[in-house]
Image (cartoon, rainbow, N blue to C red):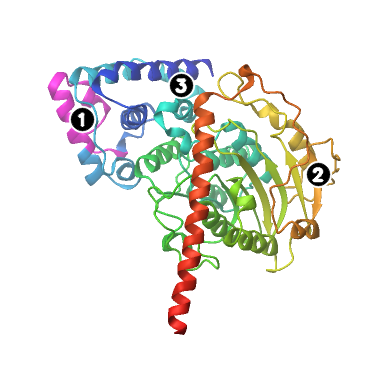
Amino acid sequence: MNTTNDIVAKLWNLCHVLRDDGITYHQYVTELTYLLFLKMAEETGTEDQLPDGWRWRDLVNQEGVDLLRVYRLLLIHLGTEGTGRVQAIFTNAQTTLRQPRNLQKLVTSIDALDWYSARQEGLGDLYEGLLEKNANEKKSGAGQYFTPRPLIDSMVALVKPKAGELVQDPACGTGGFLVAADRDIKAATDDLFDLPEHAQEFQKKRAFIGVELVQDTHRLALMNALLHGIECDWLLADSLSPRGASLPKVDVILTNPPFGTKKGGGRPTRDDFTYPTSNKQLAFLQHIYRGLKPGGRAAVVLPDNVLFEDNTGQQIRADLMDKCDLHTVLRLPTGIFYAQGVKTNVLFFTRGATDTGNTKAVWVYDLRTNMPSFGKRTPFTRGHFEDFEESFGEDPLGKAARTDQGEEGRFRHFTREQIKARGDNLDITWLRDDSVERAEDLPEPEVIAAEILEHLRVAMEEMEALSEMLEGEDDSLEVAL
């Protein structure tokens, strides 16, 4: 991985060259996606998917103003005249580069990298390294769609997607969950060679269903899939719209739905939800448990307010525990999301064969209390999940033998009756917080600010929900009169 890390560092350092051109980090990664696609097509011998005259060498052979002009025309041409994945990646593509010398620097630098070694180590790993760099840079704002790799890898390892299963991420961002699931399946099947030909075809072209609302992010997801040998068509769409209702039922859902406000998505327009709500996370939760086949399993990252919100929130949690076996809740530590101050959890559940009484008990693992505040000073790694994964057990349905660790331990068992007595509130804590917060232990200022903003956002959503409920009562009263 040394060559891959070196290339990622070199490509990322080029971003500093572009600051004078007014390029943001996110724009830079999008720009790199266009250029890397062309270069990697040359390196992997797949340039036949690109029309003559619109390939990497056609850029390299230009200079100055002509280079920028040809590049702009190339983006338009591939976005309108390209086919399949090429057109999807370049649709509505436009460059934010204004200075020909900066484009020249990018093209020359990319062309000079050690591509032979990069191919040996995996071009997909190289691209994921860039996405992670982007997410690490708080100013890029990319943390909103980038789930930390240690968390993704742990969730995939516990849910155990298998060859032949349909796997969905209804808010796929750059495709991290689906790429990790694909990697796990390939590792278990000798890179799919253990499978018959028809099963290999299914894995490459139909096994993974991704949906992403934001076009630039969708572009990055398609590139990520391409470099990992995934040929499935991932949708540019909103899972909370009627398009989401038409998706097929699946065996596995792995996802981290967007936190925060309704920006970019508006109010969910699905008319098939039993409990309409303007809360995006609660709407996504309904999409997920309704989208599983009987016996299908899910692991979903959700903020704390989903565990305790009253009214519609309580109804949706009760419905979830009826239709599914909600067997495990993992309380995640703070500070692990690059651009978020929210406190989060992972819900693990299995869709029942019937629609009632499926949750008999919930196990809660507290990985938050008395944990360090993670960030650049204290990196979050896969090793932090070791005890949880051992406690969870080998059964992806959560039915392995487990031990209640008592009031001093991190893993506890709560019956459905106990949870019902709490008003179906799943925000359960029992550990005493022993930390005495010194100045050096406090989260970074931007994390504290983000937490404050998150509390305000939740309060605003609760006020909106109350307002909608009161408006509904007024409408009912008018009809009655």
Q: Name, please, the residue furthest toward the bottom.
A: 481
Q: Secondary structure at mark 1?
A: helix
Q: Dot 3: within a 10 Å radius of its alpha carbon, few (fewer than 14), some, or many (20 or more) residues?
A: many
73 within the magenta span: yes
Q: Quadrant of residue 19?
A: top left
Label disc, if present, on residue 11 of the rendered structure? none
Closer to the eye: label 1 or 2: 2
**Please, is residue 280 above or below residue 40 in the view?**
below
Closer to the eye: label 3 or 1: 1
Residue occupied by mark 1: 71
Q: Position of residue 120 (x, y in %)?
A: 50, 22
- Mark positioned earlier in the residue sequence (3 or 1): 1
The answer for how far apart the CA atoms under marks 2 and 3 are is 46 Å
Q: What's the magenta region? A: 49-75
- Mark positioned earlier in the residue sequence (1 or 2): 1
Residue occupied by mark 3: 118
Closer to the eye: label 2 or 3: 2
The answer for how far apart the CA atoms under marks 3 and 1 are is 25 Å
Judge left or right: residue 381 versus residue 142: right
Judge left or right: residue 452 versus residue 349: left
- Give 1 or 274, whichever is nearer the viewer: 274
Q: Position of residue 53 (x, y in %)?
A: 19, 33
Magenta residues: mostly which secondary structure? helix
Q: Given the image, on which type of amino acid does mark 3 rest? A: Ala
The answer for how far apart the CA atoms under marks 1 and 2 are is 58 Å
